[in-house]
Image (tube, rainbow, N blue to C red):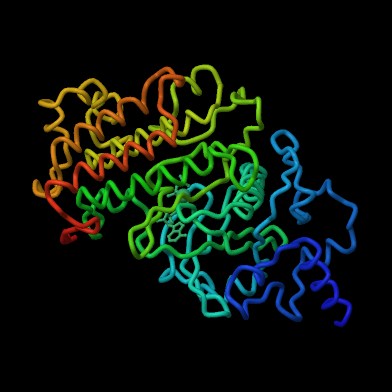
Amino acid sequence: MEGEVAACISLSSSTHPTTPQNHRKPGKTIMPFGIVSAWNKRRRSKSQDHSDPWVYKPVEFWQLEDQTPQSTKRRLGSSVFTLKEMEEATCSFNEKNLVGKGGFGRVYRGVLRSGEVVAIKKMELPTFKEAEGEREFRVEVDILSRLEHPNLVSLIGYCADGKHRFLVYEYLQHGNLQDHLNGFGKAKMEWPLRLKVALGAARGLAYLHSSSDVGIPIVHRDFKSTNILLNANFEAKISDFGLAKLMPEGQEIFVTARVLGTFGYFDPEYTSTGKLTLQSDVYAFGVVLLELLTGRRAVDLNQGPSDQNLVLQVRHILNDRKKLRKVIDPELSRSSFTLESIAMFANLASRCIRIESSERPSMAECVKELQTIIYTNSKPMGMGMGMMSFKMA
Ligand SMILES: Nc1ncnc2c1ncn2[C@@H]1O[C@H](COP(=O)(O)OP(=O)(O)OP(=O)(O)O)[C@@H](O)[C@H]1O
Ligand SMILES: [Mg+2]
């Protein structure tokens, strides 16, 4: 037993040079005393074996060789949890704790032994998709544990126990933006709040593109309204970095044969040529702006064939003030917006979704414009940012 404990201690100190003890709440422990996970045992017995995909390897060994020049930035650190801790936190993955489901698996609300409330994402993939899921898991941990920004979701830790994979995040009370826009029994968002969410998301993307902390600009590649999570104050936090791509200096374009992302948000230049740029995120950001403006989904298969794609549906009227009125989300109270701010917002969206990526604004420019739009909207009405009304489910 002594040997087991020693192994836990040496693993946590060697693989996590900047542990959560350095920046998270005091009293939070990593690799709690006495816990010996299956991967930990295997790690000792096959410490040189980096070929078996199911043997957990410390982040240092994760070969993101096709995209990662060594970063000199500190790793913020993330806790390592056992399967038992994940079960305890979620009452054995009780359905009552289920908060959502996505392509990677189910997401549960959980409470850690420290009392911290978290969101636990459990990898549940068919066998043929496991390798892909494993890669996304590693990219998520590797990138997110090195980033810190008020508009990015915080990764608290992960669990890699045998074949089990879990990601543990800060819990965001108001879930994802899309559910709010579609009014799934939630608070309906008024225009000032939508502007605040747009600005927060723009700041998060601008930070990713600016190379801060990691030292290399990052393309998110899966920016969309379900990956914008909202905290108790409706501050936007970008999530899901599994498809993110580091773009080293001088490599503003990455060419790939496999196009990854989500329908409705794909940059047409990326899909037609395989050329991925920071501007691909700007396109997806433009689509989210359209969702905020219209309250419609990026792709809605319940609509007629010509109305299923939001961009195709509204692109041609975004700079036509008369026609624009017709697509404003009818759920918005007329008193919450000025037509001037709507016109400016629609114009920004129209530039973000330009076919030519070089004609789109940068995220830093989007941040500045949104600040101006917020000012324009608040000036005549003197309203606060937190305006919202409640829609009955
Ligand atoms: N940190 C979190 N706090 C609160 N709820 C969360 C958190 N992370 C995810 N969720 C909820 O779980 C849902 C599923 O998330 P997930 O990222 O797995 O899928 P998705 O983004 O909806 O879809 P996709 O897998 O296609 O990207 C989210 O839409 C959100 O409502
Ligand atoms: Mg998501």
Q: Going by the image, does 140 lie left or right of 328?
A: right
In front of the other: 204 or 170: 204
The residue positioned 57% from the left and 59% from the top of the image is 155
The residue positioned 19% from the left and 58% from the top of the image is 388
Using the rendered image of the protein, determine whether residue 129 is visible from the camera's viewpoint: yes
Q: Going by the image, does 245 lie left or right of 369?
A: right
In front of the other: 248 or 382: 382
Q: How far across and down, in percent of the image, does residue 139 sit?
A: 64, 46
Vertically, is 346 above or below 53?
above
Using the rendered image of the protein, determine whether residue 309 is visible from the camera's viewpoint: no
Q: How far across and down, in percent of the image, does residue 219 sit?
A: 55, 36
In front of the other: 93 or 384: 384
**Which quadrant is home to the N terminus?**
bottom right
**Which quadrant is home to the C terminus?**
bottom left
Q: Quadrant of residue 267?
A: top left
Q: How far across and down, in percent of the image, does residue 60 sit?
A: 78, 51
Vertically, is 317 above or below 52?
above
